[in-house]
Amino acid sequence: GQSLEQPSEVTAVEGAIVQINCTYQTSGFYGLSWYQQHDGGAPTFLSYNALDGLEETGRFSSFLSRSDSYGYLLLQELQMKDSASYFCAVRVAAGAGSYQLTFGKGTKLSVIP
Amino acid sequence: EAGVAQSPRYKIIEKRQSVAFWCNPISGHATLYWYQQILGQGPKLLIQFQNNGVVDDSQLPKDRFSAERLKGVDSTLKIQPAKLEDSAVYLCASSLRPTGETYEQYFGPGTRLTVT
């Protein structure tokens, strides 16, 4: 099976930088994804890391270390609209050439003025 | 491009009743997923279709849950009979290519089910 650990809640100030960590234990690991979900909304894709290193997309960056089974999401220049839950998810082999996502429990980010 | 459509958005039923949810994925998307998201947790995959075939239903409680994707387009998920612990948001997602070729999934708004 798979297990993922991420902080349940994080609070940060508008304009600041925040890092949300994710550690995982799994077999058949292929990559780490991050999704954002506003209250009552649909999860939306933010990033995917298959290889070690940092991927940057605008204000958001994601990092992966496969040897440490660890990744993080970095949000810069925080805005009030970034208040949401952030989920890390491991992409693992599901058999018959298919893959599936297993999600963590999510980190609720609150951005305060 | 229209997103993933789901209906109904909300449903309240009594335990032991039946309920069905409908999902229409983004046009042309080959792969369709049903997830269950209990309050305060991440989505949990129930079943995954590629076109109209099931590729993974290992986490689907088959004694009460069933799903189909006729003609490889829209899909229905059914619960019969419902239990209190089935109260959750049921999310449908789709991806353009088979999961071996893509990692991005597009989620619908979900159906919030309350079982009383």
Image (tube, rainbow, N blue to C red):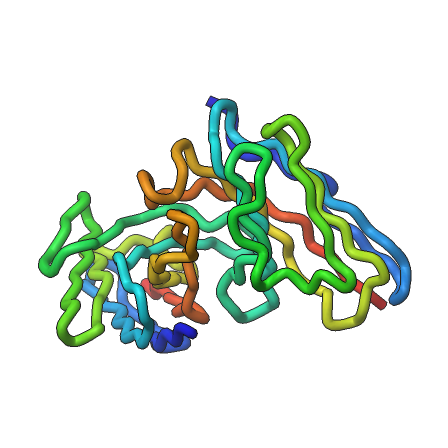
The spot of residue B23 in percent (x, y) is 64, 37
The tally of labels here is 0
Place of residue A111 in the rendered image (x, y in percent of width and height, measured from the top left): 34, 63
Residue B48 x/y as whole percent: 54, 48
Is the residue A20 above or below the residue A42 in the image? below
Q: Residue at x 58, y 50 (%)?
A: B34
Where the C terminus of chain A falls, by quadrant?
A: bottom left
Location of residue B52 (image quadrant): top right
- Residue occupying the point 26% across, 72% down: A21
x and y, in percent, of residue A98 in the image: 40, 48
Question: In percent of the image, x 20 and y 54: which residue is there?
Answer: A50
Residue in front for this viewpoint, B47 or A109:
B47
Which sits in the foreground, B84 or A19? B84
Give the vertical position of B49 relative to A69 (above or below): above
In the image as oriented, which residue stretches furthest toward the left?
Answer: A53
Q: Relative to residue B32, is residue A86 depicted above or below?
A: below
Residue shown at the point (52%, 43%) measured from the top left: B93
Residue A31 shown left or right of residue B105 in the figure = left
Where the N terminus of chain A falls, by quadrant?
bottom left
